[in-house]
Image: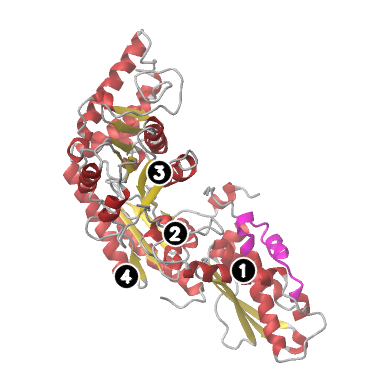
Amino acid sequence: MSRVPLPYGPRILELFRNPKNAGAMEDATVSATAGSPICGDVIAIYLKIGEGDVIEKATFESYGCAANIATASILTEMVKGKTLREAWEITWRDVAEELGGLPSIKFHCGTLAVGALRRAIRAYYEKREKPPWLPEEATLEEKQALEAERMGEMLSRRMGGGEVEQPPR
Amino acid sequence: MFSIEELLKMHGKAEREVYLDLENSAPVAPEVLETMLSYFSEKAYGNPSITHKPGWMAYDVIQRALENFRRWLGASRAEEINFTPGATEANNLALIGAAQRNKRKGRRIVISAIEPLSILHVSEHILKPLGFDVVKIPVDEEGFINLDSLDEAVNRETILVSLSAVNHEIGTIQPLKEAVERVKDRNPEVIFHTDASDAYGRIPLDVGKLSVDMATVNSYKILGPRGIAALYVREGVEVERLLEGQLGTQRLWPGVENVPLIVGFQKASELIFKDFDGRTSYMRHLRDQLIDGILSSISGTLLNGPREGRAPDNVNISFLGCEGEALTIELSLRGVYVSSGSACTRRLLQPSHVLMAIGRRPEEAHGSILMKVSWLHSDEDVDYVLKVLPEAVERLRGLSPLKEG
C-alpha cells in the first residue's frame, strides 16, 4: 500500500499534457474499448482503415491516469500508416519502450491500450474474411483487458457500504 | 528509471502556487520556522536529563511546552502529555501499548470503518495477529459513526475503543462526547482513544470535558513541523512502551527529546489558539468558498462528507468522469497541489476505504480530490483554484470515452 511518487518519464508527461490523436473519430471504420470505469481506466481506440488494410488514421479516448492517456496516445501514433497485420504485432512492451519506459504498476495501461487496439482489429475482420495471421485465441493483452473488466464487475457487485464487519454478539 | 528532475522541469512556472495537500504534509508557517531556528544550535540543545546548563535549558523548554499543551488540550496534568515523533507513532503507541498492557481484561478492540491507516492497519496487521478481536463499526453516508453499532460492539471483553474525533479524509466531526458516554455506560473499564489529529486546532477539543482516556494530536496539520506529535494519556491509564532505551522526560517514548520540533509544534498551536475563533472561522470561510465555488461551477461533482458538522478545513469532492491521479497531475502542472482517493496507484486494491465505507461507488472514489485549507491561505488562493480547476476537469473529461454521470 505504499504511495511512492510515480516516476513518470518526460515523454509520458508530455503526451499527458499535449496528447496526440485525442478524441472520438466520426468516420472511423472501426472502434473498440477496453477497461472498466470501476477500476479507474478505460481506453477507446478508433481506426480509419483504407486500401490494403492500412491504418490511415487512429485516435483514442481515455478515462484514466496520466500513463493511461499517454499509452493510448502513443499507440495511435505507432499504428499510423501500418497495415492491420503490422499493427497486430505491437505488444504492450513495444508501447512501454516507445514511452521511454513505464513504471511497473502502470504496465496494465499498456496492455489495456493494446487490448483495445486488437479488439478493434478483430472487429474489423468480423465482417470480412479472417486473415490467417489473426489468432483464434485471445492474446495476453486481450485477456488482461477482459480480466480488468471482470474485476470491475466483481467490485461493483460487492458494493454497498464497503467492507464493514458486523460485530459478533 | 526516470529523473524526477526532468519531471519537475516540465512544470514550468505556474501563475500561482497553492498547496492544499495538508492531509499528507505541509509547509511550516514562517513564524513557526523562525521560532524553531535558534533551538537547533543556539539554545536548549542539551539533553534535558543531564545536569548542565544546555540540558537544564532544554528541560525548562519542555516543561513549559508540556504545560501549554496541557492547557490547550484540557488535560489535568502536564505529565499526561507525551511527545512522539509523529501521529503514526502516537497511534501505534496508543493502540498497541494499551492493548498489550490490558490484554488480561479482555481481547476486543473497537474502531470505525473510516479510521486512518495508523489505526486501521495497526488493528488489522498487528493486533489481530496477536489474538485481539477487532470490530469495525460502520458509518453513515456522511461518515458519522453509527452509535447503536457502537453500543452493540462494546461488551465486557472490550478493552479499547479508538474513534477519530474528525475524519481525516472527509472531515466528519463525530459526536465524540456521546460516543464516550455510551461506551463507558456499557463498560466503564474501556480505554477510549481518539485520533484528534484533524480536530486539534480546528474544532474545540477538551480531553477533560470529553472524558477520553487517550488522544493523538499532530503538528504538521496545523502548520507546525513534521516529525512531532503528542499522545495524551490520562493519569491512571496503563500503556506499555513500544520502544525501550534511555528514558528522559517522556514516560512513554524513550530517546533524546527533539526540542526544536517541540518548540515548533508549540508555536503552531499558539498561533491557532491565540485567536481560535478568528482562525477557524477564516478557514470555514475559505472552505465554503471552495465547496460552493466548485459545486456551482462544475457539473458532475459530489461533496464527500457532511455539509454540517464538517471540519473547517476539509474539502473533499468527487469529479465524475475524471480519474483522480490524472487530475492531481493536471492540477500540479497548473500549480495547485492536492491528493486523491483514487486506487490508481494501487492496482487490484480498492480506492480510499473511507469513501467506500460511506457508500461511494469505486468510480466516484476514483475521481475524488482532497483539499485542506489553513489560516495561511488567502482568498486569492481560493480564486486561483476556482479558476484552474474547471479547466483541468474539462480537459480530462474531454479526453474520456465515458459520458458524464
SS category of the residue bearing label 3: helix
Amino acid type at image mark 4: Ser
Q: Mainly helix, strand or loop, the magenta region?
A: helix
Choose mark 3 or mark 4, whichever is in front. Answer: 3
Per the model, the C-alpha gap separating discs 4 and 1 is 37 Å
Q: Residue at x 57, y 47 (%)?
A: B5
Q: Name the residue under label 3.
A: B119
Amino acid type at image mark 2: Leu
Per the model, the C-alpha gap separating discs 2 and 4 is 17 Å
Mark carried by residue A147: 1
- CA neighbours of label 3 inside 10 A, class few (<14), some (14 to 19), many (20+): many
Per the model, the C-alpha gap separating discs 3 and 4 is 37 Å
Q: Residue B158 lies in magenta, yes or no?
A: no
Per the model, the C-alpha gap separating discs 3 and 2 is 30 Å
Q: Mark 4 lies on which chain?
A: B
Q: How many labels does the image show?
A: 4
Q: Do the residues labelled 1 and 3 touch (CB within 8 Å)?
A: no
Q: What residue range appears in magenta?
A: A88-108
Q: Mark 3 lies on which chain?
A: B
Q: Nearest the camera: B222 or B79? A: B79
Q: Which of marks 2 and 4 is nearer the N terminus?
A: 4
Q: Mark 2 points at which residue?
A: B331
- CA neighbours of label 2 inside 10 A, class few (<14), some (14 to 19), many (20+): many
